[in-house]
Amino acid sequence: MLRMLPFTSLVLFAAAACTAAPLKCLIVDGQNNHKWKETTPVLKKQLEEGGLFACDVVTSPPEKGDFSGFNPDFAKYAVVVSNYNGDPWPQAVKDNFEKYMRNGGGFVSYHAADNAFPEWRAYNQMIALGGWGGRDEKSGAMVRFRAGNMVVEAMPGKGGHHGPRHEFQIATRDPRHPIMKGMPQLWMHAKDELYDSMRGPAENMHILGTALSKPEFGGTGENEPLLFTVAYGNGRVFHTMLGHDTEAMNCVGFMVTLRRGAEWAATGKVKQKLPADLPSADKVAVR
């Protein structure tokens, strides 16, 4: 005998059936000159809020450790988030990651992940700009944003610098991009490192957000790119230079751009709605 469900049960059942499974995300950590043991749990929590992502974490061996058992299965994931800055990966792991990206993988380079692997050409193409690690003019050009345009400058000098941590204003440079759509044109970011003078191939990059690197904080006086996307093969990269520590990561602007950037890297689209507590042009919003 067929038993009919109450109407409310049918609605709930239909809603559950239509709910998409979370996107699989892999966070890579284990070495970093930043406090990865503190920041990785925050990355995981922020990405998983709302149920869009389900994150695994793979932790590398310590510095100069045995990497023979380190072989993440990147192909299982819609997006890989790097919180890693340390020893070179084994060649087989690098090859697998390049293949993953060429075949349409998603990648988020978070803060000091762009300090990693100065000698790995493909990785530097993925992140477009990096710093430190001996980077100089041989590593590529510097990129600034002037008069509404991306300016690529070939000049001598070291790659990578920041002054003391401070609050700074971010300018949304492409309000039509899915990651930035609806974000304020100008918004204050919590106390953080403002990276400047970054270098790299600067190929296939699209600037989403910049900040003025003020000379009074030891900066360049230039509008430096801090949020941008990069195309690599069929893969999509979201590069955020924000988020030095948990204080900076508590900024709502950081949370929103991280989650939206990860969703875009994974799917090419952004379905997340913006929260009501966004930062304004003169006030930081934190949680």
Image (cartoon, rainbow, N blue to C red):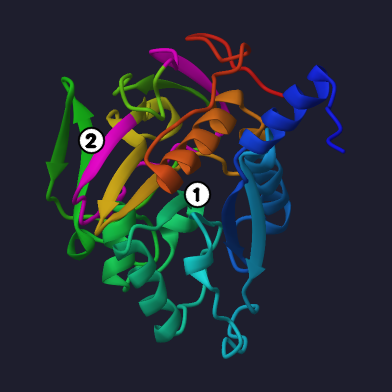
Residue that carries the numbered disc 1 in the rendered image: 110
Of 74 and 287, nearer the camera is 74
Q: Kindly identify the residue that appears in the image at 72 percent across and 58 percent down.
A: 37
The residue under the point 56% across, 40% down is 243
Name the residue rendered at 53%, 27% in the picture: 272
Q: Amino acid at mark 2?
A: Arg
Label 1 Cα crowd, 10 Å radius (few <14 / some 14-19 / many 20+): many
| Mark-to-mark CA distance, 1 and 2 | 20 Å
Query: Would you place residue 197 above or below residue 136 in this image?
Result: above
Instruction: Specify the segment rendered in magenta.
Output: 182-208
Q: Nearer the viewer, mark 1 or mark 2?
A: 1
Can the viewer see residue 206?
Answer: yes
Res. 144 mark: 2
Position of residue 126 measured from the top left corner of the image (x, y, whole percent): 31, 57
Residue 201 lies in the magenta stretch: yes
Give, as a three-letter code, the residue at label 1: Tyr
Residue 197 visible in the picture: no
Which tag, 1 or 2, sits closer to the chain's start? 1
* Left or right: 256, with 200 as reference point: right
- 47 on left or right of 226: right
